[in-house]
Amino acid sequence: MLPTARLTLADVLRSYARSRADALCLGDGDLRLSWHETNVRTNRVANALRSAGVERGDRVLWLGQNSFRLYELLLACSKIGAMFCPANWRQGPDELAFVIDDLAPRVVVGQHAEVGDAIAAGRERSSAAEAARWLWHDGENVGTEEGDSYESFVADADPGDPDLDGTSDDALLLVYTAAFTGRPNAAMLSSRALLAQGALMAPWQGIDEHSVFLNSGPLFHIGTFMPNLSTFAMGGANVFVARSDGDAMCTAIASFGCTSGFLVGPMVDAVVTANAKLQLDLSTFHGYRGNPDFDAMVQPDGSLWGRAAGGYGQTEVMGMATFNLLGTGAGTHGRPSPLVQIRIVDEDDNDVPPGAVGEIAVRGTTVMNGYWNRTELNAERARNGWHHTNDLGRYEPDGTFSFIAPKGRMLKSAAENIYPAEVENAVRAHPAVTDCAVIGVPDATWVQAVKAIVVVADGSQVADTEIIEWCRSRIASYKKPRTVEFVDELPRAGFFVDYDELDRRFGGGNYPGGHTRST
């Protein structure tokens, strides 16, 4: 019997380092790394991590914005069987402290620019921080109490391949997803899931070895990782900008000839503003976005994905579980991926008939290994061998699929999910607040804006601006309420807050799935 293949991300890198040695693999500002150079650098990173005590199954945490170093850390972790987590750099100190304590990482790589103060405060509040080796990927801080320079850490490491990979089924990438309980959970995604989804979607997206993908969306978000991994799987190049800055995105597209990228509404507007005089040639980029000024700068996306993008998915299933491009009909979200099976089940896990709504349950190649450090939640969500998504959906009589809504409530700000429970917990922590409910109101730019409806404690006073600033200091800024309404009490249906009444009274709408619209 032939031995079973165990291809990992590290194996793909090794293969292209031989077959595409001089082709561009990673770009970042003035930096250009070939596949061979990326492989050697990744060997050094992997061996440096080993020297810092990182073993198979240990966690490496990235607390910074987009960078080629983020990606080489992911590949280095693949080479030694460790797990890599790019955390949301927009989080506040308490949220960052939670992530550090939850992961108990062996190595943390931070960033001074823009996020350094929040990281320092989170580190101070964390009980697990001082057990980790701290590095900084920007600036020179060799030998300081804060930590060492990442580049110095890597420079003297052995360039030889450690060849200590885990298997393709081992968890590699950890991506935190918000939870309806208000506590985030890290979905554990394997090389198997990452490569399978990337390889499946690449031809649909028109991605091949000549593709250059602009990583302008955040890499703590699975939406950016999907085309990133498709590009990696096909031997194309990944280019990084720290964040969605208009000048940086335009410069990267023009300098590297980027052929696609993760751009949503506000990012498109930033590109248009930065390139208003058409001083840079962006014509290599494919993908109209509905802004006539932007569309005039780029080429149409003629791929299957470009003609019929979207579907249903979540981080826990490596992004997409159904695709519109697999066929439309009565359903709103296409048909299931060939890499998964999808059932619609009732509370007893029995299949419901076509046309009936139930919980979406998924199993297959791209489904996560579970949540890190969540034994009870994993048992509940993975019961009977299926990942229970906590989302509602239905099969239509023609076999197409419709996502209806989360079982709990979720808001959408551009590409980011916001769970009301998390925001409500932050507001309730204010000493002048006795109760709070959060809704989403339609927003022309961001899809939804967060509105907090607040009950103030007897004898207390608090202004709306104070509530907003209170939240800004505790949770990521994009999650904070945009507006605040004060009421004497929250409307209830039995024991529970009546969110439908709050939506009606305060103009809620535009929820994911389209189940509630403002009137």
Image (cartoon, rainbow, N blue to C red):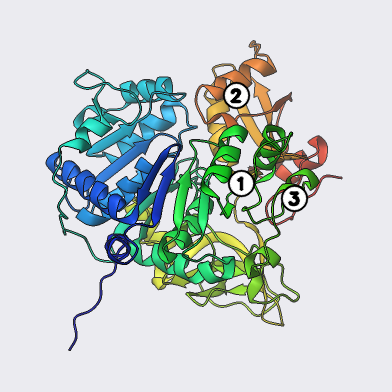
Measured as percent of width and height from the top left, residue 128 is found at 25, 31
State whether residue 341 is above or below residue 158.
Answer: below
Give the number of the mark in front: 1 or 2: 1
- Residue at (51, 42) in percent of width and height: 218
Answer left or right for 82 relative to 473. Answer: left
- Closer to the chain start, of discs 3 and 1, is 3
Crowding at mark 3 (Cα within 10 Å: few <14, some 14-19, many 20+)? some
Q: How far across and how far down the image is residue 178, in percent?
A: 50, 45
Element marked by disc 2: strand
Q: CA distance from mark 2 to mark 3?
A: 49 Å
Q: Which residue is mark 1?
A: 415
Quickly name the residue at label 3. Answer: 295
Indicate the position of residue 201 as horizontal and vertical percent values.
52, 68
Q: In which quadrant of the rendered view does residue 267 lie?
A: top right
| Viewer-nearest residue: 233 or 493 | 233
Residue ID at (62%, 20%): 467
| Distance between the alpha carbons at the discs numbered 3 and 1 | 20 Å
**Res 481 seen here:** yes
Residue 373 appears in the picture as rendered? no
Q: Label 2: how many residues lie within 10 Å, few (<14), some (14-19) or many (20+)? A: some
Q: Tell me the quarter of the image containing the C terminus.
A: top right
Q: CA distance from mark 1 to mark 2?
A: 31 Å
| Amino acid type at image mark 1 | Ala
Q: Pointer 1: residues within 10 angstroms few (<14), some, or many (20+)?
A: some
Q: Which mark is residue 434?
A: 2
Residue type at tag 2: Thr
Depth check: give the residue in front, 23 or 226: 23
Q: From the image, which quarter does the N terminus lie in?
A: bottom left
Pointers 3 and 1 in contact (C-beta within 8 Å)? no
